[in-house]
């Protein structure tokens, strides 16, 4: 009994030390500002990139939406069908639990700061417990916990992909696995809870935690020759997970498509473990240079850190006589790790800046695997086991605590530039101009009274600020800013909207947005007298929206707005393929193209010159034989000078 109490006391001390150290890391990197629930500056401004705006917009839509079942479904997004905020990465379980609290408090309420702080505390706590399984020294385990709480893959995701900061789920699953192997048991309530929580935080954790769970159950079943109880445990856990996922809306509708890439694009490069290149140019090493990557390899970022990279060979050498036995003893864990690694590398095998091979996969498998299209993330259980192996190897050396402390110092010194950059990024994200919205025209103030925002064609510029704009003003929207949405249903809805516009039908409470000017010009003619129609830009000209705003006809807005009419300028179609470059025929550079529309035909038919920048270029030929396009051959040396120009005709 005394021994058990001592063991429990040691476990509690280790967890507390790891958690406290990790909380200190959080405050050193991010400060206290994110913990103010009334401070949403870093959510609106964007942290590192704009993904947190998606997370926050999803929460805002859900918070103001009528409560229904399944929970966490908001009909204000992907309207009228709706979508679960799991697909805006808004941490659905937390959104459901905190919605009553936020409504009681009122006003601005964001939970991403406290969620991330708790994730750091649990990361450090479970990191220390893992270390404690392989080392008796409490100071060494406390130091080792810093390898987990300052893990580059945790720092890379925290606040950027907020829900993916819950990497403590992986550590907790690994802790249960190693405890289970030592104690000859599998029925850990903690492991059951971890798998359940994974579906409520982010579905990408499910294959990671369940892979570790499966390894423990298989090894237990083979060792004891009893498979009934492990099968029941797994079945009950899967059933509970499915029920919670259903209740939180993960199975709601058909929001399983969307996005610009399939499985294989966000694959793990073979150099990932020693490539310190994070997103937006952040370098996680003082010593190692950034390595080349291909396509979406950046999302499979898995830099171990110099301290771990140095310690791993030492660990392998120290365990050389026992390595084969260790692998045999943990055969199921090795097997699931091999599967996770293969999935992370994918059938598109890349090394540095080269694609070594693309293995043939049936289209049905690619579609299935694209449920987890960012497959490189599934390497995380292997990643953290490598970190643990590095620690355990050093712990076996004479004066192991000294070597562990040295490795941690090297690790922290190596990644310190990235920690400082992340600190500066959080400071900048608190400033209003960190990621300024492009919605600067006074048109948007007039447009705030609509009930619906329709994205009639294309993904809109600055889509996430548009989502925040819609959420702030109580609008519904079909704008596809969620990570998953029903692509077929959206296209069918857009087809219906275009058909209604062609018949001159407008919903007076809806704002219509187009991404492409040619499509706007094709749709605007029948409704131009019943709405303000035209182009709205950002102040720097980087963002453009082509809008139909019912009821605002006759209104005059600022210089960022160009109303549609006979004086509206022409622009080249931004079309590029093997023959065309942004609307200019590459072979001659004398022929340009426009999308066919009544307006473009009126402008070009019978015109003799195309004019831009005070210069006139004679029209030699107008060709409309290619359906949907008007091709104009000019007497010009190089028509690329017409890119991005406002054109008129004579």
Image: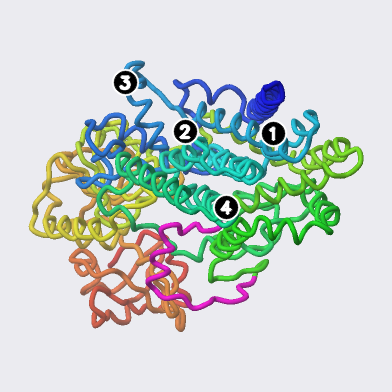
Please state if 437 lies on the left or on the right of 328 as rendered: left
In the image, the segment drawn in magenta is 354-376
* Quadrant of the image containing the N terminus: top right
> What label sits on residue 224 in the rendered view?
4
Q: Report, in whole angstroms, how far the alpha carbon at label 3 lies from the one at label 2.
A: 19 Å
Residue shown at 56%/28% (left/top)? 117
Q: Earlier in the sequence, mark 2 or mark 1?
A: 2
Q: Earlier in the sequence, mark 4 or mark 3?
A: 3
Using the image, determine if residue 563 lies above or below residue 430.
below
Q: Earlier in the sequence, mark 1 or mark 4?
A: 1
Query: What residue would you read off at disc 3?
Result: 103
Q: Residues within 10 Å of mark 3 (few under 14, many from 20)?
A: few
Residue shown at 29%/66% (left/top)? 649
- Quarter holding residue 156: top right
Q: Residues within 10 Å of mark 1 (few under 14, many from 20)?
A: many
Query: What residue would you read off at disc 1?
Result: 128
**137 falls in the magenta region:** no
Query: What residue would you read off at disc 2?
Result: 43
């Amino acid at each position: 009994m005394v021994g058990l109490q001592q063991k429990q006391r040691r476990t509690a001390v280790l967890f507390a030390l790891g958690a406290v150290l990790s909380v200190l890391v959080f405050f050193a990197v991010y400060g206290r500002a994110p913990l103010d629930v009334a401070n949403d500056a870093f959510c609106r401004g964007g942290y590192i990139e704009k993904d947190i705006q998606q997370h926050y917009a999803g929460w805002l839509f859900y918070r103001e939406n009528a409560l229904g079942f399944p929970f966490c479904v908001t009909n204000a997004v992907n309207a009228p069908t709706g979508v679960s905020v799991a697909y805006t990465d808004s941490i659905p379980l937390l959104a459901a639990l905190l919605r009553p609290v936020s409504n009681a408090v009122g006003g601005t309420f964001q939970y991403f700061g406290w969620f991330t702080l708790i994730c750091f505390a649990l990361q450090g706590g479970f990191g220390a417990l893992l270390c404690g399984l392989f080392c008796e020294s409490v100071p060494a385990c406390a130091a080792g916990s810093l390898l987990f709480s300052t893990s580059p893959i945790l720092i890379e995701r925290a606040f950027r992909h907020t829900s993916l900061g819950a990497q403590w789920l992986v550590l907790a699953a690994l802790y249960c696995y190693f405890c289970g192997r030592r104690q000859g048991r599998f029925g850990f309530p903690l492991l059951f809870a971890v798998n359940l929580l994974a579906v409520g935080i982010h579905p990408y954790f499910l294959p990671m935690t369940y892979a570790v769970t499966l390894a423990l159950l298989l090894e237990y079943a083979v060792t004891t020759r009893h498979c009934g109880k492990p099968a029941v445990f797994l079945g009950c856990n899967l059933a509970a997970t499915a029920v919670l996922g259903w209740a939180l809306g993960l199975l709601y509708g058909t929001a399983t498509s969307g996005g610009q890439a399939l499985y294989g694009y966000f694959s793990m490069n073979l150099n990932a473990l020693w490539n310190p290149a994070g997103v937006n140019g952040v370098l996680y090493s003082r010593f190692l240079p950034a390595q080349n990557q291909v396509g979406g390899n950046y999302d499979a970022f898995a830099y171990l850190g110099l301290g771990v990279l140095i310690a791993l060979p030492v660990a392998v050498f120290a365990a050389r006589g026992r390595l084969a036995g260790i692998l045999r003893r943990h055969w199921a864990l090795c097997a699931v790790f091999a599967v996770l690694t293969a999935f992370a590398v994918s059938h598109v095998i890349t090394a540095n800046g080269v694609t070594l091979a693309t293995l043939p996969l049936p289209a049905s498998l690619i579609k299935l695997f694209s449920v987890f299209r960012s497959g490189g993330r599934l390497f995380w259980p292997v990643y953290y086991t490598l970190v643990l192996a590095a620690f355990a190897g050093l712990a076996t050396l004479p004066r192991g605590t000294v070597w562990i402390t040295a490795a941690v110092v090297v690790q922290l010194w190596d990644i310190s530039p990235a920690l400082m950059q992340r600190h500066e990024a959080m400071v900048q994200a608190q400033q209003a101009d960190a990621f300024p919205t492009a919605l600067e025209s006074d048109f948007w103030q007039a447009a705030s009274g609509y009930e619906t925002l329709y994205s009639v064609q294309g993904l809109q510029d600055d889509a996430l600020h548009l989502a925040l704009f819609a959420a702030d003003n109580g609008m519904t929207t079909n704008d596809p800013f969620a990570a998953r949405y029903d692509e077929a249903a959206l296209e069918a809805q857009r087809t219906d909207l275009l058909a209604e516009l062609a018949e001159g039908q407008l919903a007076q409470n809806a704002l219509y947005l187009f991404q492409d000017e040619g499509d706007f010009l094709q749709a605007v003619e029948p409704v131009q007298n019943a709405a303000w129609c035209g182009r709205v830009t950002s102040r720097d000209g980087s963002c453009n929206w082509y809008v139909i705003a019912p009821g605002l006809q006759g209104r005059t807005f600022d210089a960022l707005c160009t109303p549609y009419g006979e004086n509206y300028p022409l622009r080249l179609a931004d079309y590029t393929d093997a023959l065309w470059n942004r609307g200019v025929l590459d072979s001659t550079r004398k022929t340009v193209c426009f999308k066919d529309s009544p307006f473009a035909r009126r402008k070009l038919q019978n015109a003799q010159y195309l004019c831009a920048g005070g210069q006139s270029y004679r029209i030699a030929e107008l060709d409309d034989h290619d359906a949907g396009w008007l091709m104009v051959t000019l007497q010009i040396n190089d028509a690329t000078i017409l890119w991005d120009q406002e054109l008129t005709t004579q």
